[in-house]
Image: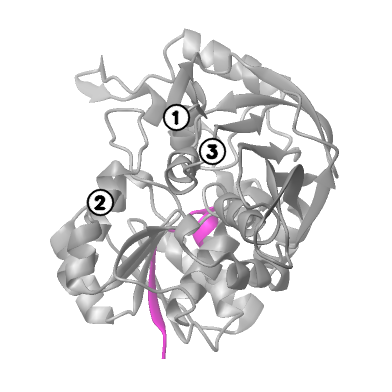
């Protein structure tokens, strides 16, 4: 029996729990907890209606470690799947350490009072998890997550070395709203407004937010403007691919999104500094997140596709000998996901789907023992093949093709 406790009740959690319920031979007993129990109950009702599987629900504040420890001991799961906010990663890891239970998340920790997301806080847990004989798997979403697995699959099967890497994340969906974010507004806006950083010749180079833009023709979507940003997998990829000379992350945004975000930033609504209002401190960005449409409500109206993948250039691998050929090649590996198909299957749009499915697959890798170890691990440290196989089987099929040469941007 593989009993799991999922923490968080947003769109990603909804997708992950729906997909877990479809794989009952691995996920035999699913428990769902969140600060707002009614959200858990709504997900459980949808899962019951779509799959016939019962989900137990609980109310929990994931930042209250003693209460979370009590819940984990009550449920006795084999794995805790953290699909809550990144602020809550460390408390949940603390609870897993105290109870001796494996841990998985989809996004690395960031403090509430600083728009800075890095792995070092969680990497610092490695020895404690190793000593406890338990495993933590970090970043099992799409980006981070699948993008790292894509990269390591290319290194295993196509390229002996990777010299240049570009990650391209395109959401070509239209939700019909004047301004909305496709995942948690607070996290989304903090990421977008933070300075961009990319890996170049052994160090991170910082540039102003949204300062570098390219145009790329995404299959299934068309030409879109993509902006260079910092994303956490750049940190882990540069660590685990030591020969990497340059790595960049690009995300698409429409003109209307940029226009609205610019105005909100100019008037201070994206700030995380407290503002005194009517006798109490409020965080402008948190207030903005409260009034924006909830991402989990956008599924029904969102039409179009996402296209997320990586373009890697390096020395080609001779599959017969396992050695390099001395010839440089470039490969593009990606997934295209339909918002409408994601909603029909799980009641959620494709941005939640492309993160929730990899969360389920990473969990399955751990529960079946295909990925194992004592300590804290990133996706790049695991064998990509079984994960890639499950992507094809569970709604995120991928394709790979050779390009004429490295990207020109």
Circle nearer the N terminus (3, 2): 2
- Residue 80 sits inside the magenta stretch: no
Circle nearer the N terminus (1, 2): 2
Circle nearer the N terminus (1, 3): 1
Q: What stretch is highlighted in magenta?
A: 1-13
Q: Looking at the rendering, which quadrant does residue 111 occupy? A: top left
Residue under circle 2?
A: 90
Q: Position of residue 43 (x, y in %)?
A: 52, 66
CB atoms of marks 1 and 2 within 8 Å: no
Q: Looking at the rendering, which quadrant does residue 176 occupy? A: top right
Residue under circle 3?
A: 244
- Residue drawn at the location 73% of the way across and 64% of the way down: 319
Residue under circle 1?
A: 202
- How much space separates mark 1 and mark 3, taking CA atoms? 8 Å
Position of residue 58 in the picture relative to residue 90 (left or right): right
SS at mark 1 in the image: loop
Q: Where is residue 170 in the image (x, y as percent from the top left)?
A: 70, 38
SS at mark 2 in the image: helix
């Amino acid at each position: 029996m593989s009993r799991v406790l999922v923490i968080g009740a947003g769109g990603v959690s909804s997708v992950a729990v729906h997909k877990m319920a479809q794989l009952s031979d691995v996920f035999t007993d699913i428990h769902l907890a969140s600060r707002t129990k009614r959200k858990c109950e709504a997900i459980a009702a949808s899962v019951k209606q779509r799959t016939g599987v019962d989900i137990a629900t609980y109310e929990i504040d994931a930042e209250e470690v003693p209460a979370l420890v009590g819940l984990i001991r009550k449920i006795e799961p084999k794995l805790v799947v953290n699909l809550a906010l990144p602020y809550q990663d460390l408390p949940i890891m603390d609870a897993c350490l105290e109870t001796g239970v494996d841990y998985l998340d989809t996004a690395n920790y960031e403090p509430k009072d600083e728009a800075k997301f890095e792995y070092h806080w969680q990497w610092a847990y490695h020895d404690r998890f190793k000593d406890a004989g338990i495993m933590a798997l970090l970043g099992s979403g799409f980006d981070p997550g699948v993008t790292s697995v894509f990269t390591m699959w290319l290194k295993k099967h196509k390229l002996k070395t990777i010299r240049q890497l570009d990650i391209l994340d395109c959401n070509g969906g239209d939700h019909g709203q004047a301004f909305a974010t496709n995942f948690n507004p607070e996290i989304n806006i903090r990421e977008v407004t933070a300075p961009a950083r990319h890996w170049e010749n052994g160090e991170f180079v910082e540039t102003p937010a949204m300062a570098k833009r390219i145009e790329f023709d995404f299959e299934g979507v068309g030409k879109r403007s993509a902006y260079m940003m910092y994303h956490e997998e750049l940190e882990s990829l540069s660590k685990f691919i030591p020969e990497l000379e340059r790595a960049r992350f690009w995300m698409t945004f429409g003109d209307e999104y940029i226009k609205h975000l610019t105005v909100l930033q100019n008037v201070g609504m994206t700030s995380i500094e407290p503002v005194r209002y009517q006798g109490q401190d409020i965080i402008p960005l948190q207030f903005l997140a409260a009034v924006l449409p909830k991402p989990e409500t956008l599924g029904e109206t969102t039409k179009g596709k996402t296209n997320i993948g990586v373009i890697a250039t390096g020395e080609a691998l001779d599959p017969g000998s396992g050695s390099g050929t001395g010839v440089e090649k470039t490969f593009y590996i990606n997934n295209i996901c339909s918002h409408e198909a994601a909603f029909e299957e799980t009641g959620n749009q494709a941005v939640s789907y492309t993160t929730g499915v990899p969360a389920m697959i990473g969990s399955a890798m751990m529960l079946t023992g295909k990925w194992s170890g004592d300590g804290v691990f990133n996706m790049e440290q695991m064998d990509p093949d079984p994960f890639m196989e499950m992507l094809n089987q569970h709604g995120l099929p991928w394709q790979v093709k050779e390009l004429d040469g490295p990207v020109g941007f």
